[in-house]
Amino acid sequence: MTRFNRREFLKTLATGSAALLALRFTSGCEFVDVETFGTGGDTSFLTPQDDGVWFWQSGNSIAKEDAPNIAADDWRLAITAGDQRLGELNYQQLRELGAQGQELTYWKTLRCVFSLNLGPLLTSLIANGLFTGVPLTAALEAIDIPAEAVKIRTFGADGFTSNIPLSRLNAEGQLPVMLAYELNGEPLSRLRGGPVRLIIPEMWGYKNMKWLDRLDFTASDEAFGVYETVRFRGVASIDAPGKMALANHTITLAGRNATLDGPDITIEGVAVSGDAAITEVRFSVDDGPERQADLLGDDAGEVRQSLPPALQALMADAAQDDESWPLPNVWVRWSANIEGLSPGSHTLTVRAFDSEGRAQQLDTGDPLAVAQAVRVPFEISD
C-alpha cells in the first residue's frame, strides 16, 4: 500500500483524481446502488442489513467472501493490557448481560470515511439502522482497568486495528459505546461484522470495529490503527476524535452528470453530522440564490410509522425515543422541488447545517474534519 502524507492526500482530494485515490484505498469496498436505500419503500429511514443493500467495506481491503465467519458460540473477546490478560467475554455472557437489564438500542448512521462527495463511486458508503447490544462499560465492570490507561486499542478478527480514547466510555451527554449483537432486530450478520462489533454513535465507520475480538488498554496516547498510521498517516483528524464530518449525500443525482427530464425535477438526499443534529439543508442551481429543502421524517412518530410493527416496538425502546428529532449522529432525509429548468447543463450545490452552528463550505482543505459542500453537475434533457 502506497503511503500518502497529509499534503499529498489533501492535494489529491482537491483534484479530479480523487476517485482514483479512493479506488486505491477501497479495493475492499463493494459499492451498492444508492437508490436502494434512503428513499421509497416502507422502510425508507432504515437500511436493511441485507447483502447488496447495506454497504460492504473492509478496512484491510479483503473481499466479502474472505470476511471472518465466526459462529456466535465461538466468539470470544480478549481484554488485555499489553502482555497482561485482564479477562475474556464470550457471546453467551454478553447476551446474559443484556437479559439482566443492560441491553440498549439506538439509531446509528454508519458512514465510511471514503463516502466523501467527490465522485460517483463515493456516495453509497452510508447506511442507517437500529443497533442493539450492551454498553461497553457494563461488559468491563468486572475488569481491573490499569489506572494509567488512556486509550483502548481495538482489534478485529480480520486483522484491522483502530483505537478509542478511554475517556469516551464515560463521556457525559453521549450515547454509550456499544458491543452490538443485533441490527434492525436481527442478529448481526457476518458481513455487518457479526456476531459482535463495536458501535460508537458519533464516529466514522472505521472506529466501529467489525468482528471485534480484542480490546487492549494502553498508557500510550500515540496514534494506533491501520487508518490512523498507514492509510491516512499524518491526517490528524483521522485519529482523534474520529468524528464523522458534517455530510450531505444527494441520492437523485448520485451518479453525477445525470440526465433528468425537465423542466421540473425533484432532488433528494440524506444529511448527517457526527456529533450534532441536522437543522437545515439549503440548495442552489447554477450558483443562484439558496433555497431551503424540506427535511423528511424528522419526527419520531413519522419515522416509527414507516417501520414494520416489530421495528416500531424496537424503536419505542430505543435510547433516543424521548429526544427531539432530527437526532445527532443519525441521518435526516431531505427533498426539494426545482421548477422551470432550461435544457442543457446545470450544477446543483447543496449545503447542510447542524445544531453546533456548522455549515458545509465549498472548499475546506480537509474534508475529513471540516464540512464540505456538495456540487453536482447534471443535464436537463431537451
Image (spheres, helix red, strand yellow):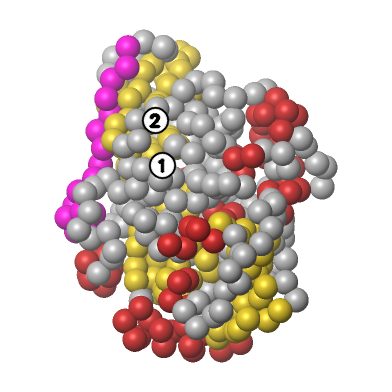
Q: In the picture, residue 152 is in which quadrant?
A: bottom right
The amino acid pointed to by label 2 is: Arg
Q: Label 1 near label 2: C-beta < 8 Å?
A: yes
Q: Which residue is mark 2?
A: 358
Q: Position of residue 334 (x, y in %)?
A: 31, 37
Region in magenta: 289-305
Secondary structure category for the residue under label 1: loop
In-front residue for pair 272/155: 155
Residue drawn at 25 percent across, 69 percent down: 317
Residue drawn at 43 percent across, 27 percent down: 360
In 3D space, how far apart are the residues under numbered discs 2 and 1 (Cα atoms)? 9 Å
Looking at the image, residue 313 lies above or below residue 220: below
Residue drawn at 50 percent across, 77 percent down: 140
Q: Which mark is residue 273?
A: 1
Q: Position of residue 273 (x, y in %)?
A: 41, 41
Asked if residue 312 lies left or right of residue 34, the reply is left
In-front residue for pair 80/32: 80
The amino acid pointed to by label 1 is: Ser
